[in-house]
Structures are given as C-alpha cells and as structure tokens.
C-alpha cells in the first residue's frame, strides 16, 4: 500500500524529479547507518526507540501525497508557474494517519528486505506522526478533547493552548525523549536532500567525516548543505526558511 504509493508519487522536483520512495529510502538508509553505529547512537538507546525513529524517517514525508502539494512539486519540476493553493506537507500528515498505521507490517517488511533491519515490537504511532509533523520545526502534534473522543490535531503556535487540548508532542519533546537520536529524522532528510541536489549516489563519504551526531550536524552547517536544500525547496515553496536555525537547535541539544 504505502510503499507502492510512494513509488508513484513525486518527492523532489529538481533534476527531473525524484520519487517519494527514492527520497524516503535514501533518508532511511542514512538513519539506519547512524542508528546502527555506536559512535553516533549509544548502545543504551532502547531497540524500541531505534525502531520508531527508523520507521518515522521512512514515512516522514507522507504529507507530500496531498494532491495540492503534489501539484506544487509538479509545477516546479516542469518549470511552470506555481498553483495558487500552497500547502505545507507536514501539515497534511494526519490526512494519512490511518494509511500509515495500516501499512505498519508492509513498511517493516520492506525495510527489513532492503536494509536487513529487524523491528523488535509494535510501534507508537503518536510519536511517529509527531516526528513527521515536526521535521521542519514549524508544527507540533496536539491532542484535543471533542466530546468523548481525543483527536489529533496539527498546530503551529506552541505558546497557545487550544480548546480542549489535553496533551501535545513537540519537537523539543522528541529531542529529549529520543536523545541523542531525536533529531535524526531532520538530519537524514536534509542530508538525503543535499545528496539529491548534488547528484551524490551515497551519503557515506559525508557521514564518514563525523564521529558523532553533533559532528555530522557541524559538517552539514560548515558545508552549507542546509542552504543548498533550502534553496531547492524554495523552488516549489518560496516561503520556506529556517533550516539553518533548526540545525543549530539540534546541535545545541547534543553539545
């Protein structure tokens, strides 16, 4: 289900386009490389948390399946004027929450077949959705009481409490709860995007320059990789900014 949808969807608009599957798998390969190297992620991080970060890395861009966002990508790929309706793909994540849950075993089996990674347990989809919602640093996942139900909502103004809100998961929560791997979805996404922009087949040479996640983030910043990626995103989402500050935030938590 999800894997096939990703293969038929556009994930990047530059260089003739890249499928959502190709981008997602490139991100997952980077996350897997980092999660299975004790120099980057210590052995004491529970297997359940490694599972969740890897799964979240693969599905983090599911909001790009939104038809309005697909239209933005396709217009940029074809060099046409962008459509009047603009959306943030992270803000469309919950349109596909049931789809993600239903695809759990399919994604696990696929990542095992491609990466050789064995998942240890069933997953917490609240955290997985929160990783997807927060991966550009703009939104957070809110839980709000509506009658007898508690519904997930995507919110942006973290200084406000929304009607009926009984809980939330922010990027800061994920950075703390999954330390030091809480920012890995962001780092994997940015590095995979940079490799696509520079037409680099394998991120290993870049990863090999670092001996820790903090050092890897420093490499991304020193080489200006965030600026390259931000410029490419602005081709279809002109108001995108802040990747540099987001990396600074991640690095500060790893000092």
Image (cartoon, rainbow, N blue to C red):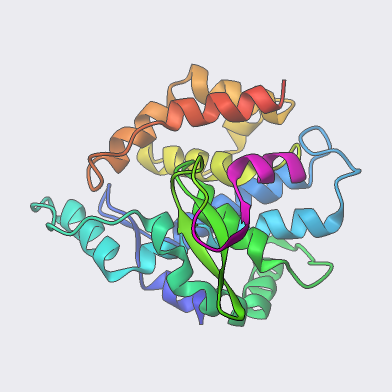
Asked if residue 207 lies left or right of residue 47, the reply is left
Q: Report x, y in % for residue 107.
A: 62, 73
Work out whether residue 49 can be spotted: yes
Q: Which residue in the rendered view is the most extreme toward the top?
A: 222
Q: Residue at x 22, y 40 (%)?
A: 238
Q: Is residue 231 above or below residue 50?
A: above
Q: Report x, y in % for residue 105.
A: 68, 79
Residue 129 placement: quadrant: bottom right
Q: Report x, y in % for residue 161.
A: 52, 50
Work out whether residue 209 can be spotted: no
Q: Residue at x 51, y 76 (%)?
A: 2
Residue 151 placement: quadrant: bottom right
Q: Is residue 40 above or below residue 188?
A: above
Whether residue 170 is in magenta: the answer is yes
Q: Residue at x 59, y 53 (%)?
A: 131
Q: As rendered, which of 211 and 61 lies closer to the eye?
A: 61
Whether residue 166 is in magenta: the answer is yes
Q: Which residues are magenta?
A: 162-177
Q: Which residue in the rendered view is the most extreme toward the left?
A: 81
Q: Residue at x 79, y 39 (%)?
A: 41
């Amino acid at each position: 289900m999800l894997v096939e949808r990703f293969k038929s969807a556009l994930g990047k608009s530059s260089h003739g386009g890249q499928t959502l599957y190709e981008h997602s798998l490139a991100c997952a390969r980077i996350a897997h490389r980092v999660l299975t190297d004790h120099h980057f992620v210590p052995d004491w991080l529970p297997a359940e948390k490694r599972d969740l970060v890897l799964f979240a890395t693969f599905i983090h861009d599911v909001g790009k399946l939104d038809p309005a966002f697909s239209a933005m990508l396709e217009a940029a790929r074809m060099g046409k004027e962008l459509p009047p309706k603009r959306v943030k793909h992270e803000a469309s994540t919950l349109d596909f929450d049931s789809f993600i849950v239903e695809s759990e075993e399919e994604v696990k089996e696929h990542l095992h077949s491609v990466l050789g990674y064995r998942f240890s347990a069933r997953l917490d989809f609240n955290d997985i959705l929160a990783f997807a919602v927060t991966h550009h640093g703009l939104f957070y996942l809110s839980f709000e009481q509506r009658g007898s139900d508690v519904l997930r909502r995507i919110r942006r103004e973290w200084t406000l409490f929304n009607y009926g809100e009984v809980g939330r998961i922010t990027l800061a929560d994920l950075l703390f709860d999954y330390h030091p791997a809480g920012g890995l979805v962001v780092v994997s996404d940015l590095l995979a995007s940079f490799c696509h922009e520079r037409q680099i087949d394998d991120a290993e040479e870049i990863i090999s320059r670092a001996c820790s996640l903090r050092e890897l983030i420093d490499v991304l910043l020193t080489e200006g990789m965030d600026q390259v990626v931000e410029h490419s995103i602005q081709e279809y989402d002109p108001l995108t900014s802040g990747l540099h500050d987001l990396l600074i935030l991640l690095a500060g938590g790893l000092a």
